[in-house]
Structure formats: structure tokens, C-alpha cells
Amino acid sequence: MTVFSTRKMVATALMAALMASPALPVLAAGSGGSNSSTNTSQPSYQQAKAAVDAGNYANAIESLTEIVKIDPNNADAWNLLGYSNRKLKKYEDAARFYQTALKIDPKHRGALEYQGELFVETGAFGKARENLARLKTICGNCEQYGDLKKVLTAAGQV
């Protein structure tokens, strides 16, 4: 057996062990919050979140697109994909991604907040107020409710 084939076997065994081990969900700070049980512990999610935090939305979109291909039920990744597209003023794409996050987790606080902000940016104030009411029902005066309320207030809509 060659050194190369031994290394390959070790690497394969290590990857199998890592894939088999249960991963704990991690909610990245500032992702808008979620009560989703989606697993966001993939390193690529953390890299994408860091890119969002740094304002590197194009890089984040690239990573997040790969993440949702692998894990199409990752509401947090769909939410950040919407957020990143909204920040690049790609409103149709953002709307579609927020809607996907909310289909997966209808009570996803971050997606409700960010979708509400999209509604404000596009002049759909009634829909933004509906999201605000949903957040009030889901989480009371939580951070996401407060943030969306501030955006609506600044727009003269509350």
C-alpha cells in the first residue's frame, strides 16, 4: 500500500466520521433570529455569514447558493440569501428567497423582519405592516419586531 492510498483512506474515514457526527445548530449573531431547527453549523454557512457581516454580498450569495443546494431546508441560509440580494437591490430575487425561508419556517423572525424591510423599500407598506403584526404575535416586542417597527416609523408608516 502506498503512502498516497493510506492518506486517501484516512481522509475518507475522517470525512465519513465527520458526516456521521450530529451537528448542533448554531444561530449566527445578526441573522435576524430564527426558531427554525435548521442546521447552520456548516463552515460554509459561517463563512457566508461573515461575508454578509462584512458587506461582501456577492461572495455571500455564492456561498449561500451552494448551501441551499446541499440543504434546501435551511431557512437561515435562504433568509441570508434574501438579505444579500436585497442589499444589492435585486428585489425580485430577495422576495423569492424570503418566501422560500418562510415556506420552510413560517415563524422565522429574521425572514419576517427582512421581508418587511423589503416591502418598505419597494413601497408595499401594507404588507410590511402585516409582517410587523405577525412578528408581534410570534415574539412580542422582540428585536426583529423592534427593528421592523423602526424602519416603518422612519418611512412614516406606523
Image: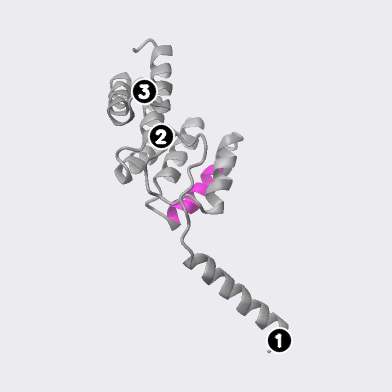
Disc 3 to disc 2, how far (Cα)? 14 Å
- Image colouring: one colour
Look at the image and give the residue range highlighted in magenta. Answer: 60-69
Q: Is residue 88 left or right of residue 102?
A: right
Residue position for label 1 = 2
| Residue 102 highlighted magenta (yes or no) | no
**Does label 1 or label 2 sit earlier along the sequence?**
1
Which residue is denoted by mark 3 in the rendering? 141
Callout 2, which amino acid?
Gly
Res. 110 mark: 2
- 10 Å crowding of disc 2: few (<14), some (14-19), many (20+): many
Q: Which of 96 and 64 is in front in this view?
A: 64
The residue depicted at 49 percent of the width and 64 percent of the height is 21
- Circle 3 crowding by C-alpha within 10 Å: few under 14, some 14–19, many from 20: few
Please name the residue shown 37% across and 51% down the image: 73
Circle 3/circle 1 CB separation < 8 Å = no
At 61% across and 35% down in the image, what residue appears?
Answer: 54
Q: Is residue 148 above or below residue 105?
A: above
In front of the other: 86 or 141: 141
Where is residue 157, by image quadrant? Answer: top left
Which of marks 2 and 3 precedes in the sequence?
2
| Residue at figure coordinates x 58%, y 71% from the top left | 14
